[in-house]
Image (cartoon, rainbow, N blue to C red):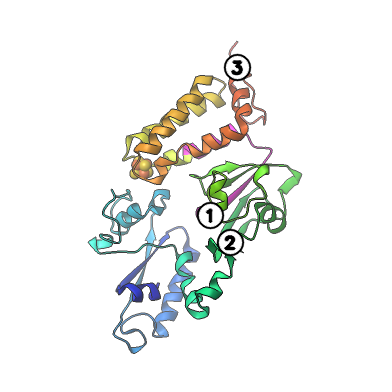
């Protein structure tokens, strides 16, 4: 961040870390102190005219604050609601000043590039996606946690079965969520996709921030999609009607389906709501509310139909209320 600040002649950098992540906050605080003691952070860095200050913002936990406009609002002490663009942050950002916003993961690559040169750095990963990627592997795998992989060199199969140690409790693999709650689901047939931005995008999925959740065959996909929609409905800031009301409507429909009261027309209605939200929402949360349902419908339409037509949950998860 100090190098980035020097490159654009900024005087201040903020590290926005969720308040719950105390360990991360402590680590960054120590790193700032170390840098100050080494004279590479603070007034007159290494005796030069350039001065740079770093401040940690212990942020309120909110999913939408990952969106840059909402992040800036929250950082300035207001409710984290995405801003209307333009202006872009590089024109008018924090405190109305030009601002660049990057993940710490991105900024952490700068010293490596400067130290070894861009050609050497580009040898890590593949041509279209160089460098490494942090992957947060969670869900039904034996080894959960954070791993760093060379971009495009590892397949989903290697991630789940070699690094993750396979599916826990001798269950089978049902699907994989990529790209976090707003991402989508892919299945076994995609296991040979390599982990890089392009490859997952081509499959209709997302690598996003690198969150991969493995789901075993014990899970009901309709119930799982409902859980995701419930999460997004909770996290929606409520500014745009298609996102706020769309999520509420989709949740109502999925609740109906998991209670055995759904109809085939409900699935078309969900698609219509998701389409409107994708076109008329202000930020990515609203634009992608259809992902959990559209991707599960793509691979598991029969399970939705079983809930609707046979009033049966194949995974025995949903308590179907049967009409006489
Ligand atoms: S899309 Fe949803 S989360 Fe984003 S600004 Fe609109 S209401 Fe808020």
Q: Report if the beta carbon of the residue with label 3 is closer than 8 angstroms to ligand 1.
A: no
Depth order, front residue of 110/219: 110
Q: Residues within 10 Å of mark 1 (few under 14, many from 20)?
A: some
Is residue 83 something one can see in this rendering?
Answer: yes
Q: Secondary structure at mark 2?
A: loop
- Kindly give the residue lying farthest to the bottom in the view shown: 47
- Against 285, residue 296 (above or below) is above
Answer with the quarter of the image where residue 321 lies: top right
Quarter of the N terminus within the rendering:
bottom left
The quadrant in which the C terminus is found is top right
Q: Position of residue 134 (x, y in %)?
A: 56, 61
Give, as a single range, the part of the protein colored magenta.
Answer: 208-230
Q: CA distance from mark 1 to mark 2?
A: 8 Å
Within the magenta stretch, is there residue 299? no
Q: Could you tell me how far apart the alpha carbons at marks 2 and 3 are, in whole angstroms?
A: 49 Å
**Does residue 22 sit above or below 190 in this rendering?**
below
For marks 1 and 2 on the same chain, the one whose residue lies earlier in the sequence = 2
Beta carbon at label 1 within 8 Å of ligand 1: no
Please provide percent x and percent y for residue 34.
44, 80
Q: Are marks 1 and 2 in contact (CB under 8 Å)?
A: yes
- Determine if the magenta segment contains residue 217: yes
Q: Which residue is mark 1?
A: 197
Element under disc 1: helix
Residue at (67% x, 31% y) in the render: 315
Instruction: State which quadrant residue 215 falls in.
Output: top right
Q: Quickly name the residue at label 2.
A: 151
**Which label number is shown at residue 322?**
3
User: How many angstroms separate mark 3 from mark 1 (CA)?
Assistant: 44 Å
Q: Residue at x 54, y 70 (%)?
A: 122
Quadrant location of ligand 1? top left
Neighbourhood count class around disc 3 (C-alpha, 10 Å): few under 14, some 14–19, many 20 upward: few
């Amino acid at each position: 961040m100090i190098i980035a600040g020097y490159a654009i002649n900024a005087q201040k950098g903020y590290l926005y870390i969720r308040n719950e992540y105390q360990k991360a906050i402590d680590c960054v605080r120590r790193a700032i102190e170390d840098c100050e003691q080494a004279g590479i952070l603070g007034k007159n860095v290494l005796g030069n005219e350039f001065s740079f200050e770093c401040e940690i913002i212990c942020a309120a936990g909110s999913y939408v604050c990952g969106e840059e406009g909402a992040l800036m609002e929250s950082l300035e002490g207001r409710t984290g609601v995405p801003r209307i663009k333009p202006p872009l942050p590089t024109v008018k950002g924090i405190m109305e000043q030009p601002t660049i916003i990057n993940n710490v993961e991105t900024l952490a690559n700068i010293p490596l590039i400067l130290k070894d040169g861009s050609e050497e750095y580009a040898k890590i990963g593949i041509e279209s996606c160089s460098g490494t990627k942090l992957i947060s592997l969670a869900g039904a795998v034996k080894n959960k946690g954070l791993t760093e992989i060379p971009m495009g060199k590892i397949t989903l199969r290697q991630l789940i079965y070699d690094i993750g140690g396979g599916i826990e409790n001798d269950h089978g693999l049902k699907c994989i969520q990529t790209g976090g709650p707003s991402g989508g689901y892919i299945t076994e047939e995609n296991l040979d996709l390599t982990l890089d931005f392009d490859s997952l995008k081509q499959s209709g999925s997302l690598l996003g921030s690198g969150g991969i959740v493995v789901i075993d065959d014990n899970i009901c996909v309709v119930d799982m999609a409902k859980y995701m929609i419930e999460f997004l409905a909770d996290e929606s800031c409520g500014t745009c009607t298609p996102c706020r009301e769309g999520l509420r409507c989709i949740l109502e429909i999925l609740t109906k389906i998991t209670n055995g009261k759904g109809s085939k027309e409900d699935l078309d209605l969900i698609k219509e709501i998701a389409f409107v939200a994708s076109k008329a929402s202000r930020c990515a949360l609203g634009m992608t509310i259809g992902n959990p349902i559209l991707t599960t419908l793509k691979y598991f339409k029969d399970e939705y139909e079983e809930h609707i037509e046979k009033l049966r949950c194949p995974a025995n998860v949903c308590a179907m209320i049967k009409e006489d």
